Image: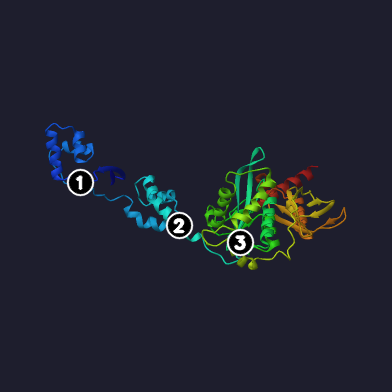
Amino acid sequence: MTSDLLIEDNELRTIVSEDIMITQDKYGAIVELAGRGMAKKAIARLLGIDIKTVRRHLRRADWQSYQRCVIKKRLLDDYVDWIKGRLLEVNYNASVIFQELKLMGYSGCYETVKEFVAPLRRAYQAENEAFVRFETAPGEQSQVDWGSVFVWLGEKREKVHIFTLVLGYSRRLFAKGYIDEKTTHLLAGHEAAFQWFEGYTKEILYDNPKTMVLRHDVATGEVLLNNTFKDFCSHYQFKPRFCKPYRAQTKGKIEASVKYVKRNFLAGRRFKSLAHFNQELEKWLLTIADERIHGTTHEKPNVRFLEEKSYLLSLTEVKPYCLIPAVQRKVSQDAMVNFNSNRYSVPWIYSRKRVDIHLREGNILILLEDKEIAKHKLIEGKHQCVVNKEHFAGLFKASYSKGIPTPPQHDPRWWDEVTVMVRELNYYEQAAQVERGLKSWQ
């Protein structure tokens, strides 16, 4: 059976029609056989049609030729061109389109708009996904992501987080398991991958994990990095790039690599410990992952890597990154923080605030909510003070101005008391005569 949709008053009504058109001769056969007393099921079986078709034609007084259903004009027809032009501007949001259509006089329901937008959104997503998988030059880009999975470690089923990095050109893969995805293991995973490949690419593509990104403005493309990860990128001099939020499929190479590790390496496996897990993973990377014929490049990753290796940034002149966890302190009332028995100034407006202290290459960085508010050279010895005079700019002026009280300027009773009373001149002459009379009487 097939269904034709008739749209009337913005409602869908289904009209069911027979695949095989009932000819006039077949209609006549149905009527004649029924007149002889043959059962409807027998007629349907004999003529090779549905019993419902037999019943429907027996209810009719005469044969009727097939008529194609005419689709009436839909309520959305007047707005189709506008909708198609507007969809990209509102990120294919059917709810926004519906709200704006109502302002334009549309009287239909939201479901109609939603059904109209859905295939257009799918087509747009498919079109955009088509250009996501692009090829990069040797040593140009790698991609990083985490994958998590429950595996048997000894007699317990534990969750393991797998740090994965794939080189964009050769598709050579590195992976290592950790107990979590915190910053310490994130940076350790990078350095382990750099050592594995004996170098690293000029840029690395990521999703938007909180261990790296504090804020990603979709409109402007501006990315605010976590200070620790920003310092790590600066240390190794590579450029981090981030997918648009909710568009993780942009890094398709690493997404496929994470799935490959899970489906191939982990299938039916159990391990003695996390250390054993990583030992077996290294063997798998060398003997299986490196030796396979990649589905996109149609070459072995380790063979293609021979071409890419010379383009990687070298590790020979870069020392391993030293991650020193942040220390939290409370700024004193006099705008100083204590660290290793020495005191360092911060801008006075941050007095009594809680701040994080980081050590970076001989400097002490003082951060408030990941914003750097002060920086000093780390000093040796104890009981010393390091003061930046600019941190106290405006403090004394503010204190002085606060110390001079300002009297109320709008007290109506004050003005009644101090206003000079104005009288006629003869009032003063009369007062003088009274005063002279009193003196003569005395």
Q: CA distance from mark 2 to mark 1?
A: 47 Å
What amino acid is at disc 3?
Asn
Q: Which mark is residue 89?
A: 2
Looking at marks 2 and 1 on the same chain, the residue that comes earlier in the sequence is marked by 1
Instruction: Give SS at disc 1.
Output: loop
Who's the residue at 18% across and 36% down the image? Answer: 43
Q: Nearer the viewer, residue 314 or 397?
A: 314
Q: Nearer the viewer, residue 168 or 126?
A: 168
Looking at marks 3 and 1 on the same chain, the residue that comes earlier in the sequence is marked by 1
Question: Is residue 211 visible to us here?
Answer: no
**Residue 412, x across and y down, in percent:** 65, 45
**Looking at the image, what colour scheme do you see?**
rainbow
Tag in front: 2 or 1: 1
Q: Are marks 3 and 2 in contact (CB under 8 Å)?
A: no
Instruction: Identify the residue position indicated by label 3 in the image.
Output: 302
User: Which quadrant, please, contains the N terminus?
Assistant: top left
Tag in front: 3 or 2: 3
Q: Which mark is residue 21?
A: 1
The crowd level at tag 1 (other Cα within 10 Å; few <14, some 14-19, many 20+) is: few
Instruction: Give SS at disc 3.
Output: helix
What amino acid is at disc 1?
Met
Q: CA distance from mark 3 to mark 1?
A: 63 Å
